[in-house]
Image: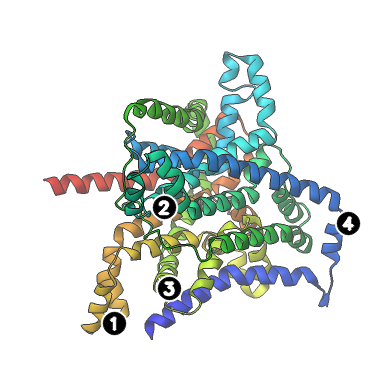
Amino acid sequence: MDKRITLATAAALLAVIGLLPLLTMLINSVVVDGAFSLKAYQALWSSGGDQLSLMRHSLLLSLAVTVLATIAGVPLGVLLGKTDLPYRGPLTVVLTLPLLIPPYVLAVAWFAVLGSAGWISSWAPEASRSLSAALFGPLGCMSVLFTTFVPIVILLTIAYLGAVNPRLEDAGRLVSPWPAVLRRITLPLIAPAILFAAVLVFLLTLGELGVPTYLRFPVYAVETMTQFAAFYDFSAATAAAMPLLVVTLGVLAIEYRLLHGQGSELRTVTFEGARNEIRLGRWRTPLLALVLAWSAVTVVLPLAVLIAQSWSLDAYAEAFARAGASILRSLVFAAVGATLLTFLGFFLGYLIHHRALPIWRNVDALTLFLFTLPGTVVGIGLISLWNRPMTNIIYATPAIVIFGYLAQYAVLPTRMTSAILDRIPRSLEAAAQMSGAGWFMTLREIIVPLARRGLIATWIIAYGFCLRDLGVSMVVYPPGSDTLPVRILTLMANGTPSMIAALCVILIGITLLPLGAAALLAGHGRRRARA
């Protein structure tokens, strides 16, 4: 009974935090002064030409980023997850870095490289002017978002390559070389992962706010934010958000229909599963050089130039003076958000993994939907629900920011917990229950200790996403409670380039701080084990 009540409570909490705000937002947009009204939607329809142009920009940008990320990410994922390429682990970490920082920080980094006063301008001023002009527009926006989201394709490709039944590949190897096996067996088997990665990239690009704002490329997501921030018109903002919500639902529905009923040739997805390794032979060194060059150009170069631009004590002093409180708030908000996400995600992941309640599939779909929904839409929904005198303790305090984190990022700890529980034999839980242990005792004494490392990784990932959040935080933060990503974006209009670069470097540093601490603790543990 304790088990069912706890899991039902977790599912209800997700519905209150994530689903109820969206329903309230929708109702408020069509009920004005107690009467049904479509005035907000009629106003949106009357400006149809502008809206269609913005939506076209968004869809074309999302499609271009998705195609490029898939074309580049799948081969990189195969090289890093299936071959004997040297330094695969460090290279995977380096290529994953863009996913851990706000996308607009990469835009700032690329401006430090290509801008009129950037790194290239010191030795190629003519080329710098052309590249700077190209950066501020669709090409620059597409390039920055491509480098930001390609790690999603890489990581999902690596994960699902470890889930392919190796006996199918062994059978193919009896009659064909590895290129044919990859083309005809392995890649078709991981096509669901590739499609899912493409859907994530498409929807995350569709809802991206920071990069188009910084690079001055008009997209539809900015329209939703404009209706809210400039006019504080909830009905108009909700009406403007509806096309994004409809597109998100449509894309997820198509993805579900394509993947529904797929074969069972994939085993449990894991980064550590047994797999057949492709020997690169004489191609090992050239391919390593190619991946190193890719990593250097897309990740190391912009971040290194950003660090060099901030390399001044005055810049960091100004950064802390103007955004010190925002830095501290971001650390606290991210730590609290990650902790609550880990707890909520553990119970939701347990519910989904064990299918403990009939609604498990609905819970899984809702977490994914909230994650792919633009943060501005989630934020407007939260305000629509909690902006009332009796709930001011949530609306007027940082609690609403934390609620936004829980709604937007619940899918991350949920999916990770489900994968972690896959590695723990169910017989252990059954044996504990047969011995008379209650469910909570079983969790405390068996499940959580065995899942400890995975839960720590879950917390670190949740912390990174909370810290980098811009869409939800920008919409819902109370006065005087802005986070560091929001503060950086607002200071870009009147801050010096070196100070903005310093703030971006600080944000990257505090994002990677838990990863560094975890690596040090892991190294210390290995040394103690050897001793």
Helix, strand or loop status at disc 4: helix
Query: Mark 4 and mark 3 in contact (Cβ < 8 Å)?
Result: no
Q: Amino acid at mark 1?
A: Gly
Q: Quote the CA–CA distance across marks 3 and 4.
A: 46 Å
Q: Quote the CA–CA distance across marks 3 and 2.
A: 23 Å
Between circles 1 and 2, the one closer to the viewer is: 2
Q: Residues within 10 Å of mark 4 (few under 14, many from 20)?
A: few
Give the image location of residue 414, x and y in percent: 44, 64
Q: Which residue is mark 4?
A: 46
Q: From what the image shows, is residue 508 above or below residue 159? A: above
In primary-sequence order, the first of circles 1 and 2 is 2
Query: Mark 2 and mark 1 in contact (Cβ < 8 Å)?
Result: no
Q: Residue 322: in sight, yes or no?
A: no
In primary-sequence order, the first of circles 4 and 1 is 4
Q: From what the image shows, is residue 14 above or below residue 465? A: below
Q: Amino acid at mark 2?
A: Tyr
Q: Residues within 10 Å of mark 2 (few under 14, many from 20)?
A: many
Q: Amino acid at mark 4?
A: Ser
Between circles 3 and 2, the one closer to the viewer is: 2
Q: Which residue is mark 2?
A: 160
Give the image location of residue 410, x and y in percent: 50, 62
Q: Which residue is mark 3?
A: 351
Helix, strand or loop status at disc 2: helix
Residue 438's disc number: 1
Q: Residue 453: in sight, yes or no?
A: yes
Q: Residue at x 57, y 60 (%)?
A: 258
Between circles 4 and 2, the one closer to the viewer is: 2
Helix, strand or loop status at disc 1: loop
